[in-house]
């Protein structure tokens, strides 16, 4: 069957460990898909607010006002941050969301409900915090596809297992939802260190993650730090760098991969047609 595109794709970049390249990956996936011609919305669900810092955006209207119902989604979205790229930022004020939403019913699905009518995007990319917070549940109950960056060090697998547990918990509580880990993305890859090689080997042997490890991953590249400091993407700052090359390739991979949601729906249609 030909690949069909039924739905807006929705991605979360997730890992329960900090400093593994989540924000970097979310920004480059979103900006990369936009540069391929897609209309993209990038949403920061991490109260650290690093997306807004990195892209140097104002922060008067944030995900907090959206979730509290104080402003409609269209006035929260910052349009045209880059060509075809819009952004919803967050700030540290969102740390108090958990308490502010304590009395809400079905508070894990507020984000999904607020964003339900969005139709003018091809893809939505969510950055997330390294914790199974209320915001993270909201992220996982909105998206269908998860990308897990893993920094190639000896502690990598531990954070990854915790992340898988989080995904599996959501899947078991909401079994009808499509929520697929589409890529484990090795970051800070440095083939010269024993630690990085050991981490990569362990990852590839892992029964839960081995099959979705994206090779060769994103190499360690100091230019990513300089790009962040200058509030630019790696393609704007240093288009010939290793990281520019690696993130371009990863974006192509995600773009060419069939949407997990479309795949799930096609399988259901096939089952109905064949009467199983
Ligand atoms: N492949 C890489 N090589 C070198 N530095 C990187 C790489 N990926 C990310 N960084 C840098 O590491 C720091 C943490 O990355 P970040 O994306 O903020 O992680 P997280 O969101 O998981 O906390 C940032 O300064 C970023 O520029
Ligand atoms: Mg981050």
Image (cartoon, rainbow, N blue to C red):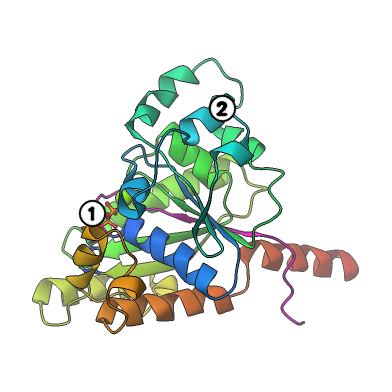
Q: Is residue 66 magenta?
A: no
> Residue shown at 54%/15% (left/top)?
103
Kindly tell me whether residue 206 is visible in this rendering: no
- In this view, 197 is above or below 118: below
Quarter containing the C terminus: bottom right
Which residues, given as a range, are shown in magenta?
1-20
Kindly tell me whether residue 189 is visible in this rendering: yes
Residue 157 lies left or right of residue 138; in this view the side is left
- From the viewer's side, name the closer residue of 228 and 148: 228
> Residue shown at 17%/77% (left/top)?
190
Magenta stretch secondary structure, dominant: loop
Secondary element under disc 1, as helix, strand or loop, is loop
Alpha-carbon span between mark 1 and mark 2: 28 Å
Residue 77 percent location from the top left of the image: 55, 44
- In this view, 143 is above or below 63: below
Residue that badge 2 annotates: 107
- From the viewer's side, name the closer residue of 17 and 66: 66
Residue 234 percent location from the top left of the image: 31, 71
Residue 97 lies left or right of residue 200; in this view the side is right
Residue that badge 1 annotates: 19
Residue 128 percent location from the top left of the image: 40, 47
- From the viewer's side, name the closer residue of 208 and 51: 51
- In this view, 58 is above or below 93: below
> Residue shown at 40%/37% (left/top)?
59
């Amino acid at each position: 069957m030909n690949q069909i595109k039924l739905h807006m794709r929705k991605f979360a970049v997730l890992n329960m460990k900090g400093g593994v390249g989540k924000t970097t990956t979310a920004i480059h996936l979103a900006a990369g898909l936009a540069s391929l011609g897609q209309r993209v919305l990038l949403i920061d669900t991490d109260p650290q607010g690093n997306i807004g810092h990195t892209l140097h955006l104002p922060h008067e209207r944030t995900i907090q006002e959206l979730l509290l119902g104080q402003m409609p989604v269209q006035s929260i979205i910052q349009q045209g941050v880059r060509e075809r790229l819009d952004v919803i930022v967050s700030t540290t004020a969102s740390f108090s969301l958990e308490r502010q939403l304590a009395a809400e019913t079905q508070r894990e699905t507020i984000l999904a409900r607020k964003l339900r009518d969005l139709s003018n995007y091809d893809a939505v990319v969510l950055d997330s915090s390294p914790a199974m917070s209320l915001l993270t549940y909201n992220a996982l109950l909105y998206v269908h596809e998860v990308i897990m960056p893993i920094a190639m060090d000896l502690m990598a697998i531990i954070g990854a297992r915790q992340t898988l547990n989080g995904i599996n918990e959501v899947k078991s509580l909401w079994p009808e939802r499509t929520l697929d880990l589409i890529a484990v993305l090795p970051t800070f890859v440095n083939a010269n260190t024993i630690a990085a090689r050991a981490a990569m080997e362990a990852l590839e042997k892992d029964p839960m993650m081995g099959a979705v490890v994206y090779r060769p991953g994103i190499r360690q590249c100091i230019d990513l730090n300089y790009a962040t400091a200058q509030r630019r993407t790696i393609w704007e700052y240093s288009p010939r760098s290793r990281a520019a090359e690696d993130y371009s390739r990863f974006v192509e991979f995600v773009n060419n991969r069939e949407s997990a949601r479309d795949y799930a729906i096609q399988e259901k249609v096939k089952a109905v047609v064949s009467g199983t």
